[in-house]
Amino acid sequence: MQTVYKNLIDHKSTYFTTAKYSGKDRIKKILSEIWRYFPSSTKFNPFKYILIRILSGEEEVDPDEIKNIRSFFLEKNNDSHIMLGVEQDLSLKEKLKIQICFTAFKINFAEVELKDLFESVPKKMIEK
């Protein structure tokens, strides 16, 4: 599921999306799903700022998985600024959940709390 906020004055958009999976190829599945729903008309270029919130269940996120997530987005646009945070949510059990915000709006990462950002968006808008 994705949510789009558009600024009609300067035509900038912000996309929120989320995906969750478990198993051996969970990162590949998550990234594939997120990319599938991304608007093919823009395919990323105007979105210089990417905020990624990773929530792990009982199984912690492997450092290689974090590296793969970051690399995936940098391959799409190496001018991107990425903020990545990892949290644990035991209610996910064996699943890994990734919430992502793509935006063209300039973000001061020093002032952003990922948890607050994603929790301020109504859950029904970004949850599956």
Image (tube, rainbow, N blue to C red):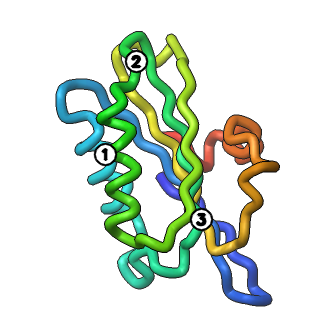
Task: Please say if the residues under marks 1 and 2 sit with CB atoms less than 8 Å apart.
Answer: no
Crowding near the residue tagged with mark 3, few <14, some 14–19, many ≥20 C-alpha atoms within 10 Å: many
Residue at the limit of the structure toward the left, as seen here = 24
Callout 1: SS: helix
Image check: 82 left or right of 111?
left
Residue 109: x, y in percent?
72, 53
Crowding near the residue tagged with mark 1, few <14, some 14–19, many ≥20 C-alpha atoms within 10 Å: some
Q: CA distance from mark 1 to mark 3?
A: 18 Å
Disc nearer the start of the sequence (1/3): 3
Q: Which residue lies under the disc numbered 3?
A: 49
Q: CA distance from mark 3 to mark 2?
A: 26 Å
Seen at 67% across and 80% down, the residue is 12
Which of the 4 image quarters holds residue 49?
Answer: bottom right
Q: Which residue lies under the disc numbered 2?
A: 60
Q: Which residue lies under the disc numbered 1?
A: 68
Q: Amino acid at mark 2?
A: Glu
